[in-house]
Image (cartoon, rainbow, N blue to C red):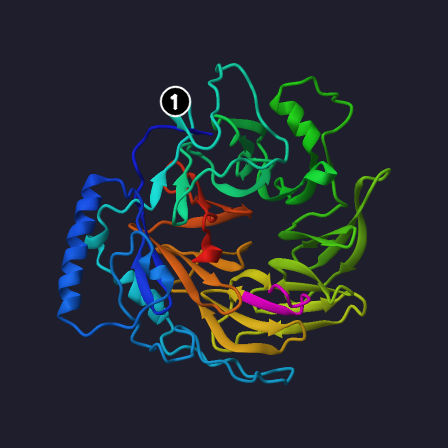
Amino acid sequence: MVLEEGIIDDSFKFYKIVDNYYYILVENKSDTAFVEQQHERNRKSEAVQRSKPPLAKTSSNSSAPGAISAFQSPRHSASSGALPDLLPPHTPPQSRSPPTPQRPQDKSSSDEYRQAVSLSSQSIRHQRSFSAFGFGAGGSTIGSQASRRGSSQINVNVTPTQTTTEAVGDTPEIRKYKKKFTSDILCAALWGVNLLIGTEAGLMLLDRSGQGKVYTLISGRRFQQMEVLEGQNILVTISGKKNKIRVFYLSWLNNKIFKKEVNEKRAGWVTVGELEGCVHFKIVKYEKIKFLVIALLDSIEIYAWAPKPYHKFMAFKSFTDLANKPQIVDLLVEEGQRLKVVYGSNCGFHAIDVDTTSIYDLYIPSHTQLPITPHTIVVLPNSNQMQLLLCYDNEGVYVDTGGRISKNVILQWGELPTSVAYISTGQVMGWGNKAIEIRAAETGHLDGVFMHKKAQKLKFLCERNDKVFFSSMRSGSSCQIYFMTLSKPGLANW
């Protein structure tokens, strides 16, 4: 992977939260100006500390490089067992229609979030947590060295292998691909090490294994959602003017990249059923079966993957004439036995027992004005798929699959996010106009914040292992793709 020379994009400020303290974490620690400022801050800090009573010690993370200021949240002391931005838990109600959990007094943001956003920007003028990362013909390499290629030579790695870690450091990093897209980026999926990108105008591939060239695979077709199943050699999409489920063969796309002769008699794609107006889908593996659950305008369809000789998705279950139109959908396997469809609408969240076909409400907000915007359905780990975090608008609630409130806490974002996603570190990320927040999925506790220097809309695309990809929404003439590296040490080890 090649790092092209370019200007540093320092549009984000990063805050790390350790116990009850906030630390501004910076990069570019070898910068002479930064080092001098750091020494000056340390001298001033020591002078201030000598004039004040000693503070209680924080965890061992308090000595992390780049920790340049700290202060304790006024809402809770070291002796308090309550989470800093959540209500103390107590025995949850057991009724089928429980009262709404008590909400934090400040409905706009938590104390932790307000403390973080109020930190002085003067102390982070040299911070570069959000670095420009472009790919092109020149520059140095990160990880393994990539040789130069002629402009006419195509050499794309589409095998599902891992690349060497692209970035090392003490803090999560956000970097930006230099390629600018003139169409809105709607979705993306990793294919091996490379990134398939769906836009309003077509399907593209970003070569992350080499010099970052972008290949146009399909033009003139809108791609709303996609997911790669490498073991089945397919790319599942919602695409086209009629929002159909169209499945593309990866081998066919591979031939288009390398410009091999393609047998036109054999189509490179198939449609799933006669479905039109698809809104959202989710692929769930149960034992050796892969289910495709699809939300349509007023119905939900479930398909199951049939291996060779069929090698296609075949109809399994159908739920029509739903009172609440689904916007997002998921499929659970409770305790490894019972299939249950969970979906979100503009009224709340609902469930369907696949065996009995009974439909019931999981959670209907009573404190907010309808309609709502459901963001994501998080299945909490180690819960036998019985415990859920339902995220909508600027908050999330904890319920079980029976519709009972399981935790008397509310996950509350500092602002209304444009995207919310569960990531493999066991955390939930929210992309707002002013900040990217990272919270623990199990508790809603605020783990870290990336502050925007100027307001911009961002959209989650996909994640795998230690990479989270997201894009800016088109403002003006173009938009770009960013990725966050979580490992070494990663968000899970903050």
**Residue highlighted by disc 1:** 138
- 303 drawn magenta: no
Residue drawn where x is 47% and y is 68% of the image:
444
Residue 473, how many percent across, how many down? 43, 45
Residue drawn where x is 72% and y is 30% of the image:
268
- Please state which of residues 111 and 170 is positioned toward the viewer in this rendering: 170
Q: Residue 240: which quarter of the image?
A: top right
Residue 171, how many percent across, how many down? 39, 50
Q: Residue 58: which quarter of the image?
A: bottom left
Identify the element where label 1 is drawn.
Answer: loop
Decide: is 220 above or below 237. above
Residue 53, how many percent across, how many down? 19, 74
Residue drawn where x is 56% and y is 65% of the image:
346
Decide: is 434 above or below 220. below
Horizontal side of 62 relative to 482 (left or right) equals: left
Residue 30 visible in image: yes
Q: How many marks?
A: 1
User: Label 1 neighbourhood size at 10 Å, few (<14), some (14-19), many (20+)?
Assistant: few
Magenta residues (range)? 380-390
Horizontal side of 355 relative to 234 (left or right) equals: right
- Please state which of residues 448 and 108 is positioned toward the viewer in this rendering: 448
Residue drawn where x is 37% and y is 62% of the image:
60
Q: Find the residue positioned furthest to the right.
A: 309
Name the residue type under label 1: Gly
Horizontal side of 463 relative to 55 (left or right) equals: right
Principal SS element in the magenta part? loop
Residue 22, how many percent across, how many down? 31, 63
- Please state which of residues 95 and 298 is positioned toward the viewer in this rendering: 95
